[in-house]
């Protein structure tokens, strides 16, 4: 092959590569113009589409053409969000969405007071990215039901026990005052005793015992002085934990109303992409495959 033929061959390869890219973009543009969200999703990730929706293996392992639109994913997500959120509203009626910037959505659980920010909606991948901490709280709350406990039962019991102990210190103030007076008399009596060589060690030990008891009572007095403040702080902690348990109960009931139990909820989450794309199949105007 001479130089001229090599140049012609290279031009053909380049022309075909450009044509493939233009064909991909024009197909994607047509899908958007016709409102064919199913085909948009197929074009964005043909490998996943074939595996999860068509249940067949794709002819390619990576769709490099999809990289052409990586930098406009926010705009694509914004466009795709309308139908997706409408679909989710029927399946997950307890989730609410806020587009905090173009194509990016927060998920809120519920429309009640103190509802929680529960994660984000990944529109491009049709996936919930739940906040790990909040999701684990919900999971644990379901698990603890078998023990007739709420998520914060143990914490509330521990805090309540601490408050009872603090209140006990306050209530025992008169008793401590009497004990201190008696110990001071003992200390005075101890100091007035003669200290013969064979008695000095015994008197010293007795005096130290009295001082240790007085020190302990003084520490309890100090705790009692701060007890009301600490009890109030504990009451505030319990209120917060109780509110969280109440919110979790709302969330659990919402899941039961829609999915019966947490396991079915998780199963729906795992198959969300395929379920949604299959729901769009009947609305699609036809499948168009774009090759690399």
Image: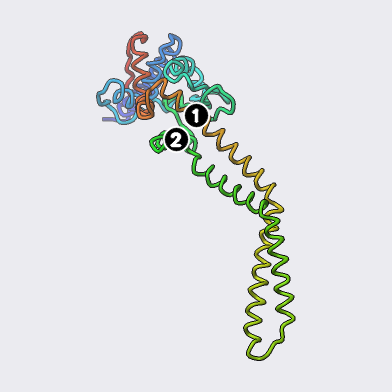
Q: Secondary structure at mark 1?
A: strand
Name the quadrant of the C terminus: top left
Instruction: Give me the C-alpha separation between circle 1 and circle 2.
Output: 21 Å
Q: Name the quadrant of the N terminus.
A: top left
Residue at horizontal 39%, vertical 15%?
A: 27
Q: Residue at x 71, y 53 (%)?
A: 225
The residue at the point 38 percent across, 17 percent down is 23
Disc 1 versus disc 2: nearer the observer:
2
Displayed quadrant of residue 156: top right
Q: What SS does tag 2 mark?
A: helix
Residue 102 point in image, percent of width and height: 55, 23
- Looking at the picture, does residue 242 appear above or below residue 161? above
Q: How is the image coloured?
A: rainbow
Q: Is residue 160 above or below residue 284?
A: below
Q: Is residue 189 left or right of residue 201?
A: right
The numbered mark at residue 141 is: 2
């Amino acid at each position: 092959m001479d130089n001229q033929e090599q140049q012609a061959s290279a031009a053909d390869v380049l022309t075909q590569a450009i044509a493939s890219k233009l064909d991909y973009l024009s197909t994607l543009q047509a899908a958007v113009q016709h409102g064919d969200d199913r085909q948009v999703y197929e074009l964005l990730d043909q490998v996943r589409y074939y595996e999860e929706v068509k249940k067949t293996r794709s002819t390619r392992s990576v769709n490099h053409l999809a990289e052409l639109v990586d930098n406009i994913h926010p705009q694509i997500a914004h466009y795709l969000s309308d139908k997706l959120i409408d679909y989710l509203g029927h399946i997950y009626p307890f989730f609410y969405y806020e587009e905090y910037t173009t194509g990016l959505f927060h998920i809120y659980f519920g429309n009640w007071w103190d509802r929680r920010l529960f994660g984000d909606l990944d529109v491009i991948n049709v996936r919930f990215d739940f906040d790990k901490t909040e999701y684990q709280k919900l999971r644990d709350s379901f698990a603890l039901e078998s023990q007739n406990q709420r998520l914060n039962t143990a914490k509330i019991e521990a805090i309540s026990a601490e408050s009872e102990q603090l209140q006990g210190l306050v209530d025992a103030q008169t008793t401590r005052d009497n004990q201190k007076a008696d110990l001071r008399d003992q200390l005075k009596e101890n100091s007035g005793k003669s200290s013969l060589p064979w008695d000095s060690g015994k008197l010293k030990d007795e005096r130290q015992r009295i001082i240790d008891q007085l020190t302990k009572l003084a520490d309890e007095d100090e705790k009692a002085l701060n007890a009301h403040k600490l009890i109030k702080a504990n009451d505030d902690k319990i209120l917060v934990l109780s509110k969280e348990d109440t919110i979790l109960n709302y969330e659990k009931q919402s899941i039961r109303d829609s999915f019966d139990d947490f396991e079915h909820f998780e199963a729906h989450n795992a198959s969300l992409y395929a379920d949604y794309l299959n729901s769009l199949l009947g609305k699609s105007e036809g499948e168009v495959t774009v090759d690399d």
